[in-house]
Amino acid sequence: MHPAYTYYLGNAYYNNGEYPKAIEWYEKIFISTKTRVITA
């Protein structure tokens, strides 16, 4: 899964008020990138 796409999905859930799902996606980003920094 591409990090930018994962970040986008997280934002989509967050904007819809689905915070638990957004957090789940953000956690996937951090796990998948380890030390890389994501910029919006």
Image: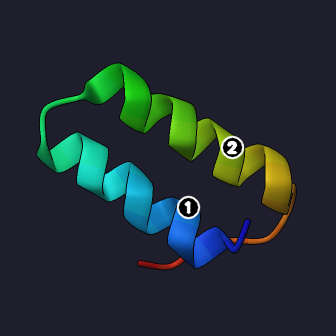
Q: Left or right of 3: which side holds 21? A: left
Quarter where residue 31 is shown: top right
Q: Is residue 21 above or below residue 25?
A: above
Q: Left or right of 24: which side holds 30? A: right
- Is there a contact, CB below 8 Å, between mark 2 and mark 1? yes
Q: Position of residue 12 (x, y in %)?
A: 26, 55
Q: Left or right of 15: which side holds 14? A: right
Residue depicted at x 41% and y 29%: 21
Numbered badge on residue 6: 1
Q: How many residues crowd around disc 1 within 10 Å: few (fewer than 14), some, or many (20 or more)?
A: some
Q: Is residue 11 above or below residue 18?
A: below
Q: Position of residue 36 (x, y in %)?
A: 79, 71
**Numbered label tally:** 2
Residue depicted at x 24% and y 43%: 14
Is residue 38 at least partly visible in the picture?
no
Q: Left or right of 24: which side holds 22? A: left
